[in-house]
Amino acid sequence: MHPTPHPTRRTRLAAASGLAALLSLAAATLPAAPAAAAPSRADLAVTATAIAPRDQVVDVGGGVTVEVEVRNAGTRSASDVTLTYGLPDGAYFTDGNGAPEGWTCDFGPAATCTYGALAAGASAPLLRFHFYLPPAPTGTVSAVTATATTTSPELSTSNNTGSAPITYVRGVTDLEVIAAQANPAQPIVGDTVNVSVQVHNTGNMTAQLVHVTVPLPAGLTRVSEDYNSPWYCEFSDTLVAGQPGWSCLYYQLVNGWTPEPLDLSATVATAVPGDVVIFTATATTTSPEDDLADNTGQASVTVAEPGTVRGTVWLDADRDGVRDAEETGVTGAQLSVGVQDEQSGETHRRATVAADGTWTTPFRAGGLIANFTIQSPYCFADSVDGDLAMYQNYSYGGGWAASNPATLAAGGEAVIDAAVVRC
Ligand SMILES: [Ca+2]
Ligand SMILES: [Ca+2]
Ligand SMILES: [Ca+2]
Ligand SMILES: [Ca+2]
């Protein structure tokens, strides 16, 4: 590192050789002393290295990681080893640093770590710490240094400081919409579509005030949105160019981090089968960003032709388990009927129930199950002319029931009946 011997070393070597009078001559001509000729002393040697990928720092200020090794290259133990960090103005140890075993550190302004005695030839446990460095122009080279001292005599102190150079690079964020999904893929009019959007930041610094906007597609009405951490969404009737939609905020999106997706939902209000509904999510940040090509993601659903699910909740007046010709739908009962997907259980639809015990609802093609509840004085009953898979009646009357699975075709019809008795 040094083209000429360090002055202190020069002095000691000269004195040890008893050639004080020839000091100036020795300084000019003395080659490095052979190891065998060196007195037996301690010799701390320090190296400092910035650790990738945190070996550079962004121009707006940011974090770096520096590893320091303290070694005793001498032939005697070094007592009371102390390491003092040198930090650029405005730099500091970030929270979360901890001293490795054997070391005791003060991460405040003192910026020192102590070790005690370090045996000849030994290395102390590596010190790997995180620092914040303040803003500086791109291209600036700063450094974190560490200097070791010992109360023992040393062969040389020219090797007691390690320096980790750190270069400032331009800070830039890169938001990417990595996933946008909408379910169910084939809703019918009246279904609620759930939209999920996931964003991450592949830049080299935190993106501030990340907004994701999603215009509400025509023909849909807003149902709900996330409004808790990490995403805070708001729906507005005048989101973009006076059009309604959502705006979701994530305050600080750390680079390399992928937060939970944000979730929105809307109901298909007016559409015809075959309509394709497209949700478009666009992410922005107030931080610098160059690559805007990947900031948009889309998810689409295709409006499907519904089928019809209907049935009759009928009163088995003579309790024979058979629907006799004169046994009509139960009248004036407090009855509710819902239909849901057989597999997912999602997309629950409440059926329209008439006073005569008949009910109907449009539903998506596929497998489905109907659920019933009825109040006293009626209870569900077994019947060969019913389609119940299970039911439970209450001791005070009334009960709930679930049907066997049925399959519905687009434009088709499924009929699900249930028997009740007076209980
Ligand atoms: Ca040394
Ligand atoms: Ca990108
Ligand atoms: Ca981007
Ligand atoms: Ca009957």
Image (spheres, rainbow, N blue to C red):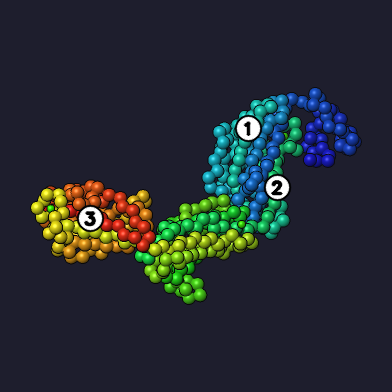
Mark 2 or 3: in front is 3
Which residue is located at x 53 percent, y 47 percent? 95
Q: How far apart are marks 2 and 3 (CA)?
A: 79 Å
Q: In this rendering, would 41 be left or right of 375?
A: right
Give the quarter of the figure containing the N terminus.
top right
Which image quadrant is residue 310 in? bottom left
Does residue 399 appear anywhere in the picture? no
Q: How far apart are marks 3 and 1 (CA)?
A: 80 Å
Q: Residue 87: x and y, percent?
A: 65, 49
Q: Position of residue 337 (x, y in %)?
A: 24, 58
Question: Sequence-wise, which precedes: disc 2 or disc 1?
Answer: 1
Whether residue 44 appears in this view of the structure is yes
Q: Quadrant of residue 182?
A: bottom left
In this rendering, is residue 309 above or below 127?
A: below
What is the secondary structure assignment of the residue under circle 3? loop
Q: 331 and 124: which one is in front?
A: 331
Residue identifier under label 1: 124
Give the x, y percent position of residue 75.
71, 25
Indicate the amino acid at tag 1.
Ala
What residue does disc 2 label?
165
Q: Give left or right: position of 301 versus 131.
A: left
Label drawn at residue 417: 3
Instruction: Give, as a three-letter code, the residue at label 2.
Output: Pro
Give the foreground label among 3 and 1.
Answer: 3
